[in-house]
Amino acid sequence: YMMRVLSCAWDKSLKQFMIYRATGWLTFLLAIIFYAIEYVTGYVYFSSNTSVNGWDRTDYLVLVTGVSVMVSAYNFIFILGHEELSELIVDGGLDSLLLKPLDPYWSVMLVGFDMPSLIELVVTTAVFIYLLQNYTLGIIKVFMIIWALIMGVMMIFLLNRICICFSFWLAKASSLGGVIEDLTSMLSRPKVFFPTIIQLVFTFVVPVLTVTNMPVEIIKGDGSVKELVYFSIACVALYYLSRYEWDQGMKNYYSAN
């Protein structure tokens, strides 16, 4: 049943993209322009032989590209579902999800895929792989980087889900849906560039700096297996926190029917 639903969601998303392909390509173009600005910024911050707090130009470019990979992957898989969820909670329209033989926590994600983000994901992943050729990486580090990227996508998803589910109690909380993307963009810089208090808050309270910096820290040797395990445990803990918020929210949910 799940595979049939995923197949239908894919077909629907592809057809919508073809119908509104001009809008889709424009969305993709804007995303690439924003990424290009971040990329060019690396050439402004660093010359070819400049190092700042142990970071050089290539390290910075890998960081911003890795963030683009994670954000585009989140947008491709989850963004449409989260936009839908916010509206359904406020409008009292979750009933159709609750009647399906699927966990409603996840089934809301099956409304469709954001196809322009898929194209962005392919482009930024290609650039990311190209940049990695500047480093000597063993197979263990490669797997660690891939896992850090996956956990980063899940962390963005979970932090967004927690923000969106405040809509069960506060009608205007739907505006929080874009906060995590904004924070991720603002904090897509080397951790050492920020004041200590910012590092502490966004590493241990809202771990956005961990999301943005972990792949490069692994590449540079500053991120260990132990830190990656802690990051994964934090992701699991955040999942159970978001599930608890979801369960409590469902008790507070009022249908429009």
Image (cartoon, rainbow, N blue to C red):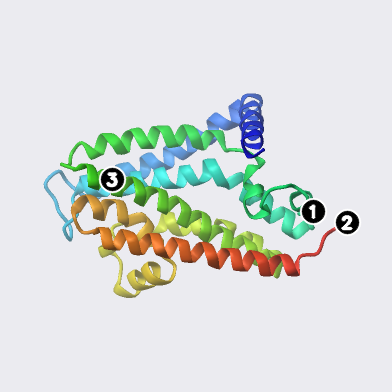
Are circles 2 and 1 on residues that touch, CB within 8 Å? yes
In which quadrant of the rendered view does residue 217 lie? Answer: bottom left
Amino acid tagged 2: Asn
Q: Secondary structure at mark 3?
A: helix
User: According to the image, label 1 marks what residue?
Assistant: 95
Q: Earlier in the sequence, mark 1 or mark 3?
A: 3
Q: Secondary structure at mark 1?
A: helix
Single out the mark in the foreground, 1 or 3.
Answer: 1
Front residue of this view, candidates 111 and 67: 111
Q: Earlier in the sequence, mark 2 or mark 3?
A: 3
Residue 163 image offset from top left, x and y in percent = 58, 63
- Give the answer, above or below, for where 125 lies relative to 214: above
Amino acid tagged 1: Asp
Amino acid tagged 3: Val
User: According to the image, label 3 marks what residue?
Assistant: 62
Spatial CA distance of label 2 from label 1 is 8 Å
Quadrant where the N terminus is found in the figure: top right
Mark sitting on residue 257: 2
Q: Earlier in the sequence, mark 2 or mark 1?
A: 1
Quadrant where the C terminus is found in the figure: bottom right
Whether residue 68 appears in this view of the structure is yes
Q: How busy is the neighbourhood of tag 1: few (under 14 within 10 Å), some, or many (20 plus)?
A: some
Residue at (54, 42) in percent of width and height: 77
Spatial CA distance of label 1 from label 3 is 43 Å
Residue 88 image offset from top left, x and y in percent = 74, 54
Front residue of this view, candidates 209 and 245: 245
Residue at (15, 41) in percent of width and height: 136
Whether residue 179 appears in this view of the structure is no
In which quadrant of the rendered view does residue 253 lie? Answer: bottom right
Residue at (39, 67) in percent of width and height: 202
Mark sitting on residue 68: none
Judged from this view, the residue extending furthest toward the top is 18
